[in-house]
Image (spheres, helix red, strand yellow):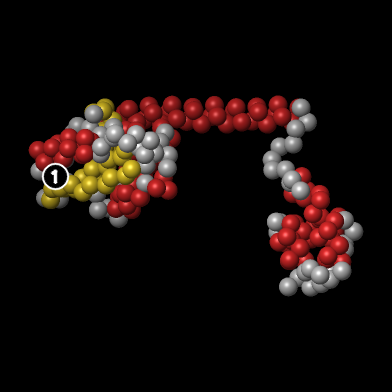
Amino acid sequence: MSGPASVLGRPLRVALYARVSTRDKDQDPELQLEAMREYVRARGWEAAEYVDTAAAGDLAHRSAWARLLADVARRRIDLVLVWKLDRAFRSTLHALATLRDFEHAGVGFSALTQPELDTTSAAGRLVFTILAAVAEMERELIADRVREGMRHAARRGARIGRPPVTARPGFAARWPRVAADLAAGRLSRRQAARRLGIGTATFARLLAADGGTEGTADG
């Protein structure tokens, strides 16, 4: 791992990020942190620690990761250090998108056990350029598969997109009763729409198609 030992005469500010999954109760973030602390201490850098217990893709519960990103955006960090790439990112695409944000903020990224993944070195930047090309190809392949799947479904006459509200279970049985209550003035249009679990605009369209049953005001 390369990179400057200091920035503008002050020690490098390093974010140590550790994550363990909730699926493996035997994991201990200290195993990741101890090695990173020793590495930072040996170089005289300043460190702040961010620790999560959550799956990689569970960004909603990775609160420490969210705080780290906020500190990156505020330029309170010079380098993000992790034990391994998968501790921080859920996929190659996630890694590349995040590292672009780091680059815009002037923040480096390094994986302690994967020295080739170091954006502060020329070799590391080359690796990420290659990963970016692979990720772009992956995006195109996924898009091609989706388009082909839609064409295949269309050829079979399958409906593409969300089913209509009238196809929801129980809707056909509820509609006549709600329409009758509306016509008798026992329900407003808003109440009728709420009973059917649809929006008032959708209800108005269905009502018009059914002959425009009259009812009370929309309130």
Question: Which residue is depicted at the point 36% across and 30% down?
Answer: 129
In the rendered structure, which amino acid carries the disc numbered 1? Answer: Trp
37 sits left or right of 72 in the view: left
Query: Residue at point 25% right, 39% down?
Result: 29
Residue 52 image offset from top left, x and y in percent: 32, 44
User: Residue drawn at (80%, 57%), measured in percent from left and top?
Assistant: 205
Q: Quadrant of residue 116?
A: top left
User: Does the rendering let one see residue 102?
Assistant: no
With respect to residue 106, does 115 lie above or below? above
55 relative to 176 in the view: left or right: left
Question: Could you tell me residue 2's position as x and y percent?
Answer: 18, 33
**Nearer-the-camera pick, 159 or 194:** 194
Q: Residue at x 13, y 37 (%)?
A: 38
Quarter the C terminus occupies: bottom right
Residue 7 on image: x %, y %: 16, 47
Say few, some or many: other residues with alpha carbon within 10 Å of mark 1 (under 14 / 14 to 19 / 20 or more). Answer: some
Quarter of the image with the N terminus is top left
Q: Secondary structure at mark 1?
A: loop
Relative placement, left or right, of 34 versus 104 is: left
Q: Residue furthest right?
A: 211
Depth check: 103 or 66 in front?
Answer: 66
Report which residue position mark 1 lands on: 45
In the image, 123 versus 24, the foreground residue is 24
Instruction: Answer left or right for 132 relative to 175.
Output: left
Q: Position of residue 207 (x, y in %)?
A: 83, 59
Residue 176 in sight? yes
Residue farthest to the front, as pictured:
25
